[in-house]
């Protein structure tokens, strides 16, 4: 070993960060371009090159006849020995040759972010390497336990985001006394977390086991990891209680076990006074948040969502003044929010208290959180009117207050419209039996992109002030008692692509303006990503507008007239629901032009005439309902029609088909199938894949036909 490095060894009491810093300085000093590379070192590097596939992204500087110390990504020491290989994210493919193990002076190897496959050669673990980063590759196989385990110098191992399998390599890692950071996240490791993790590892500070298949309990011996700063093991199958010993690791800054099956309480959390991030969401925790939470002065993120935690929010939470994120949704919290003085939480950006049992009104102190970006208080028992001081929320973009008992819609809109930054407003399930204000006495929600005011049983009309919401993409007004026609200004909402006005008392004919909606005519639209997912029935959540169908839902109103043939222009539509209305006349054959349509519901109207055979062209159609009309003639058999159940056609006594009660008396009328079954299956597969890609795959079950979408 080079004398300089052995001198480093003698200083092993210094923290690894210092050591790396010094190493880096030495490195700069030592990496003189004049050192020329040793032949056997060059041979090992060329051996590595051999393992890569031909068209791999390795720089052209790697030539046999040149000094390998000058090759890209290589740093040599004074003796011309390679000590640093740094080839992250340059598109390497192929496998990692064991010949790198012959580089006896190699200290750091960084091959992160390539497409390397195959196994990780054991030779790389048994040598002098101190930093090994092969994260974000396609390496696979077991992480073999080494036969002989000489003491290793290893400090940092990052094998995250690969395809490794097998158990935790306890023996191999046990020999690494200097190990400071181990990142095994995002692989397929199984088995239990070993109890020996921290034995003889005085520097062990960072452990990330997240996104694997570890099971069993959290070993109580973790309590011995007295230098652990980061402990992450989310997205595994861990069970049992949070061990009390864990709360003795006061060095912890980041404790993260979301999405496991953990139980227990947070009674001792106050001891972890260095915590910055605490994430225990999606477990089975119960009990209360203790007052001692107020001792966590450094706390920035608190994620306890989707547990069974109950009780009131302790007022001591107000002491955690560095909090930026409080996520407590889907628990059993109760009591009034005003117990917490939010005015001390001036850094707060994200607050989610959805689906608890909070009562009372929105506390005034919350309005002083001027950095708040996303606020969700939906599905609680909150009540009252909003205060005009809500306009202090100068950064708010996402506001969900749905499914509470707020009152005075006129006042609410007046106040909320002052929030210039607001892009998404979900306030449905409030204001019961009130009347929709018709004209704007208020400012114009100038940046609003999504508005849900559903399930309010509101009287009144589709209000004129909506016409001013030029950025609106989604409008959800279902389950009110709105009456009157669809206003003709509807097509001035240039970006609108999701319109749900179902279950109202609307009348009149479909205006031709609705057939001119620009975003429903063309497939293009930019997705918006929301901070919080939008919840819907069936547990589906959507974070982006691309998760939403392009949709027109006019179902269950009192619309009349014919279905305009111009409907064929709305070629981007994925869902069309005109059911439970008074439409008469024919089904326009132009509906066959809506090639993207996945859901078509025309049931419970007074439609007559034949089913147009053009509907056989709707290859993506998965839900189809024309039941309870007065249609006649044969049911087409081509396209998707063979997949629809008889119930799609019931209640049309003049329809005939081989499977319906009424058989067609001759084959003459049966339209010829326009595509073969094989072709049809291909199309379905394409449709499903396409749907998944855009995040709508699981959606069509939930839409229209279920008649109930839950915006909270
Ligand atoms: C490098 O070149 C030398 C002579 O030019 C040759 O002997 C040697 O085999 C080459 N090594 C490799 C790995 O190609
Ligand atoms: C390592 O070096 C030894 C001796 O030079 C050689 O025999 C061996 O083949 C090399 N190993 C690899 C994997 O290149
Ligand atoms: C490896 O390189 C990547 C990309 O430069 C960097 O993000 C990563 O921190 C490096 N790994 C280590 C352990 O330094
Ligand atoms: C791999 O993990 C180590 C230790 O946590 C870290 O220093 C390094 O930056 C990580 N690499 C990447 C690419 O994130
Ligand atoms: C571990 O690696 C993953 C990427 O694979 C990264 O997202 C994560 O932040 C790393 N963990 C730590 C503690 O550095
Ligand atoms: C897991 O690894 C895959 C493949 O490298 C990557 O696409 C994904 O983002 C990673 N997930 C996390 C949570 O780091
Ligand atoms: C935590 O540490 C204290 C004092 O160091 C000790 O008395 C106690 O037994 C420890 N608790 C656990 C559960 O290990
Ligand atoms: C709060 O955060 C700020 C900036 O992130 C930091 O400077 C300050 O030290 C933190 N306060 C505590 C008590 O940790
Ligand atoms: C809603 O609030 C009103 C008055 O604010 C009250 O009379 C009513 O009982 C509340 N309803 C529910 C379901 O809490
Ligand atoms: C709604 O609020 C406004 C302003 O606070 C008030 O003037 C009006 O009387 C309220 N309406 C009802 C029905 O309470
Ligand atoms: C709203 O009106 C319906 C029907 O008139 C009634 O049953 C219901 O109790 C009313 N709800 C409220 C909150 O006033
Ligand atoms: C629907 O509107 C009609 C008038 O068009 C009215 O008579 C009826 O009461 C309304 N129904 C409801 C549920 O509001």
Image (spheres, grey):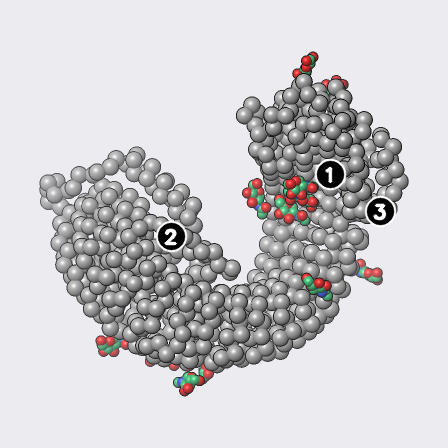
Q: Look at 42% across and 65% down and name the residue there.
A: 448
Residue for point 24% across, 58% down: 515
- Name the residue tied to disc 2: 525
Measured Cα–Cα span from mark 3 to mark 2: 55 Å
Q: Is residue 297 above or below residue 46?
A: below
Mark 2: few/some/many CA within 10 Å (<14, 14-19, 20+): some
Instruction: Specify whether residue 505 is in view.
Output: yes
- Work out which quarter of the rendered image holds the N terminus and state it: top right
For label 2, being within 8 Å of ligand 6 is answered no
* Residue with the mark numbered 3: 14
Is the residue marked 1 within 8 Å of ligand 3, measured from its CB?
yes
Camera-side residue: 256 or 216?
256
Label 1 belongs to which residue? 131
Question: What SS does tag 3 mark?
Answer: loop
For residue 576, above or below residue 215 = below
- Secondary structure under the numbered disc 1 in the rendered image: strand
Which numbered disc flags the more N-terminal residue, 3 or 2?
3
Asked if the residue at tag 3 contacts the one at tag 1, i.e. Cβ–Cβ closer than 8 Å, the answer is no
Number of other residues with Cα within 10 Å of mark 3, as a class: few under 14, some 14 to 19, many 20 or more: few
Q: Nearer the viewer, residue 710 or 376?
A: 376
């Amino acid at each position: 070993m080079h004398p300089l490095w052995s001198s480093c060894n003698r200083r092993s009491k210094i923290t690894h960060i210092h050591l790396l810093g010094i190493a880096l300085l030495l490195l700069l000093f030592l990496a003189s371009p004049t050192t020329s590379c040793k032949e056997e070192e060059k041979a090992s590097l060329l051996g590595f090159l051999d393992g890569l596939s031909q068209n791999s992204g390795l720089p052209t500087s790697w030539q046999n006849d040149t000094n390998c110390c000058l090759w890209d990504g290589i740093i040599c020491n004074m003796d011309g020995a390679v000590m640093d290989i740094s080839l992250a994210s340059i598109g390497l493919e192929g496998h990692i040759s064991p010949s790198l193990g012959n580089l006896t002076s190699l200290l750091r190897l960084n091959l992160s972010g390539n497409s390397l496959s195959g196994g990780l050669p054991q030779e790389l673990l048994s040598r002098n390497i101190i930093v090994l980063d092969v994260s974000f590759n396609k390496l696979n196989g077991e992480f073999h336990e080494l036969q002989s385990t000489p003491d290793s110098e290893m400090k940092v191992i990052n094998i995250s985001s690969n395809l490794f399998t097998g158990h935790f390599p306890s023996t191999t890692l046990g020999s690494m006394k200097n190990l400071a950071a181990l990142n095994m996240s995002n692989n397929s490791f199984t088995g239990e977390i070993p109890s020996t993790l921290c034995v003889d590892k005085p520097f062990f500070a960072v452990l990330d086991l997240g996104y694997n298949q570890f099971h069993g309990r959290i070993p109580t011996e973790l309590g011995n990891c007295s230098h652990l700063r980061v402990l992450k093991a989310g997205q595994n199958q861990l069970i049992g209680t949070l061990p009390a010993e864990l709360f003795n690791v006061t060095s912890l800054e980041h404790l993260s076990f979301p999405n496991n099956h953990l139980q227990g309480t947070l009674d001792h959390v106050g001891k972890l006074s260095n915590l910055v991030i605490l994430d225990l969401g999606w477990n089975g925790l119960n009990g209360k948040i203790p007052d001692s939470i107020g001792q966590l002065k450094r706390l920035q993120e608190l994620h306890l969502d989707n547990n069974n935690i109950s009780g009131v929010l302790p007022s001591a939470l107000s002491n955690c003044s560095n909090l930026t994120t409080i996520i407590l949704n889907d628990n059993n919290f109760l009591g009034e929010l005003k117990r917490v003085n939010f005015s001390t939480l001036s850094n707060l950006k994200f607050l989610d208290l959805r689906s608890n049992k909070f009562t009372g009104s929105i506390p005034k102190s919350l309005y002083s959180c001027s950095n708040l970006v996303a606020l969700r208080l939906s599905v609680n028992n909150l009540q009252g009117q909003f205060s005009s001081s809500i306009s202090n929320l100068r950064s708010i973009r996402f506001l969900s207050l749905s499914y509470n008992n707020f009152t005075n819609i006129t006042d609410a809109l007046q106040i909320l419209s002052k929030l210039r930054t607001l892009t998404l407003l979900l306030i449905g399930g409030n204001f019961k039996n009130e009347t929709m204000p018709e004209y704007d006495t208020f400012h114009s929600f100038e940046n609003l992109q999504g508005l849900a005011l559903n399930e309010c049983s509101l009287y009144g009309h589709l209000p004129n002030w909506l016409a001013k919401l030029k950025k609106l993409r989604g409008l959800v007004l279902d389950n009110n008692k709105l009456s009157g026609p669809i206003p003709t200004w509807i097509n001035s909402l240039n970006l609108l692509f999701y319109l749900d006005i179902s279950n109202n008392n609307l009348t009149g004919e479909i205006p031709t303006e609705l057939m001119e909606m620009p975003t429903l005519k063309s497939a293009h639209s930019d997705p918006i990503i929301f901070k919080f997912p939008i919840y819907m029935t069936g547990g589906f959540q959507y974070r982006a507008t691309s998760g939403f169908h392009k949709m027109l839902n006019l179902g269950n109103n009192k619309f009349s007239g014919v279905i305009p043939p111009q409907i064929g222009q709305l070629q981007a539509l994925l869902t069309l629901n005109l059911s439970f209305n008074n439409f008469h006349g024919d089904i326009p054959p132009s509906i066959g032009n809506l090639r993207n349509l996945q859901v078509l519901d025309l049931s419970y109207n007074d439609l007559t005439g034949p089913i147009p055979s053009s509907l056989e062209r709707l290859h993506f159609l998965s839900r189809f309902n024309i039941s309870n009309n007065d249609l006649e003639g044969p049911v087409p058999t081509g396209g998707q029609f063979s997949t629809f159940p008889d119930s799609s056609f019931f209640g049309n006594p003049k329809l005939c088909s081989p499977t319906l009660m009424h058989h067609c008396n001759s084959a003459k009328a049966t339209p010829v199938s326009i595509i073969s079954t094989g072709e049809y299956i291909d199309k379905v597969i394409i449709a499903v894949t396409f749907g998944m890609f855009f995040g709508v795959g699981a959606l069509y079950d939930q839409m229209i036909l279920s008649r109930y979408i839950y915006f909270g």
